[in-house]
């Protein structure tokens, strides 16, 4: 469309175009076959189990912070207000937990990881992210997985604010990986120039965690 009415190319659109050209952040490595929705070794549940290290921190929105740092152009600390001023997205995704339960059609609202990336602008050197949470939990992800189009920082589930037990006020959801990668009570995202094991990854879980190829444990 070159009718003279194009929006001017900003730094952001430039970056997006560069990402697209480089195929950056495309999650082409997911092994999910189109015809199969339930990954191997999983069974469906209708309830939503709670799994964590046993500490469920209660964070009031006024004191909640999200620090984004590391290999980014714009390191930032977002408070509740700044977080809600970002574009809000709606996604419906499945959950696949390494303990073999899966749950279909979870409706989330929050900020897509793509919109966060637009804000902080990862440096070309950034290859992975390490998520940290208010309970001391950490988990690592390749940047391309974190940037998946259906990944988000969720504040709502099925139209209601996320409960504390499920990671409220804000949790990460990266639906195409096992659910241990989806940090509850998130408060830090660190962009790294290499991979660094998080809590479960140091304890034998897989560094990536693709349910379609059953990347459950580090020997898989
Ligand atoms: N902060 C934090 N996030 C976490 C965990 C945790 O212990 N602490 N457990 C992980 C694991 S192992 C799973 S299976 C999911 C469970 O999320 P749910 O309790 O909402 O089902 O959260 C993941 N995120
Ligand atoms: Mo888990």
Image: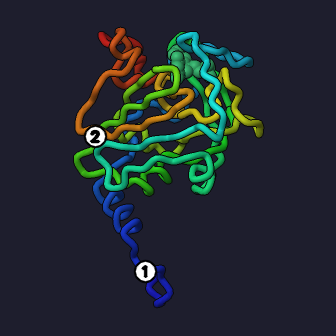
Q: Residue at x 49, y 27 (%)?
A: 133
In the rendered image, residue 99, in percent from the top left (x then y), is placed at 54, 10
- Please state the horizontal and vertical placement of residue 27, each as a whole percent of the image: 40, 41
Residue 206 is situated, as x and y percent measured from the top left of the image, at: 36, 17
Label 1 or label 2, whichever comes before in sequence order? 1
- Left or right: residue 127 versus residue 1 is left
Determine whether 162 is above or below 191 in the image. above
Viewer-nearest residue: 168 or 26: 168
Which residue shows up at 66% across the image and 34% down it?
A: 60
Location of residue 210 by image quarter: top left
At label 2, counting other C-alpha atoms closer than 10 Å, the crowd grade (few under 14, some 14-19, many 20 or more) is some
Determine whether the residue tagged by mark 1 lies in a helix, strand or loop. Answer: loop
User: Which residue is disc 2 drawn over?
Assistant: 127
Q: Is residue 213 left or right of residue 113?
A: left
SS under mark 2? loop
The residue at 22%/46% (across/down) is 125
Residue that extends furthest to the bottom in the rendered view of this protein: 4
Residue at 54% from the left image edge and 42% from the top image edge:
150
43 horizontally vs 15: left or right: right
Q: CA distance from mark 1 to mark 2?
A: 29 Å
- For the C terminus, give its image quadrant: top left
Mark 1 lies on residue: 8
The residue positioned farthest toward the front in the image shown: 63
User: Residue 196: which quarter of the image?
Assistant: top left
Residue 199 visible here? yes
Tell me residue 185's x, y (percent). Answer: 56, 29
Badge 1 crowding class, 10 Å Cα cut-off, few under 14, some 14 to 19, many 20 or more, is few
């Amino acid at each position: 469309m070159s009718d003279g009415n194009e929006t001017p190319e900003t730094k952001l659109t430039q970056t997006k175009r560069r990402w697209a050209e480089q195929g950056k952040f495309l999650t082409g490595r997911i092994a999910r076959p189109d015809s199969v929705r339930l990954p191997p070794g999983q069974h469906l549940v209708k309830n939503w189990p709670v799994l964590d290290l046993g500490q469920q921190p209660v964070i009031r929105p006024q004191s909640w912070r999200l620090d984004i740092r590391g290999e980014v152009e714009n390191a930032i600390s977002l408070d509740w207000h700044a977080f809600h001023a970002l574009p809000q997205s709606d996604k419906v995704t499945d959950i696949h937990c390494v303990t073999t339960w899966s749950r279909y059609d979870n409706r989330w609202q929050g900020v897509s990881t793509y919109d966060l990336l637009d804000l902080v602008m990862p440096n070309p050197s950034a290859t992975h992210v390490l998520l940290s949470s208010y309970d001391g939990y950490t988990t690592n992800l390749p940047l391309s997985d974190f940037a998946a189009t259906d990944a988000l920082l969720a504040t709502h589930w099925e139209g209601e604010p996320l409960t504390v037990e499920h990671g409220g006020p804000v949790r990460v959801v990266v639906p195409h990986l096992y659910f241990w990668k989806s940090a509850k009570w998130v408060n830090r995202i660190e962009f790294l120039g290499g991979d660094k094991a998080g809590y479960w990854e140091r304890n034998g879980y897989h560094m990536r965690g693709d349910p379609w190829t059953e990347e459950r444990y580090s020997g898989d």
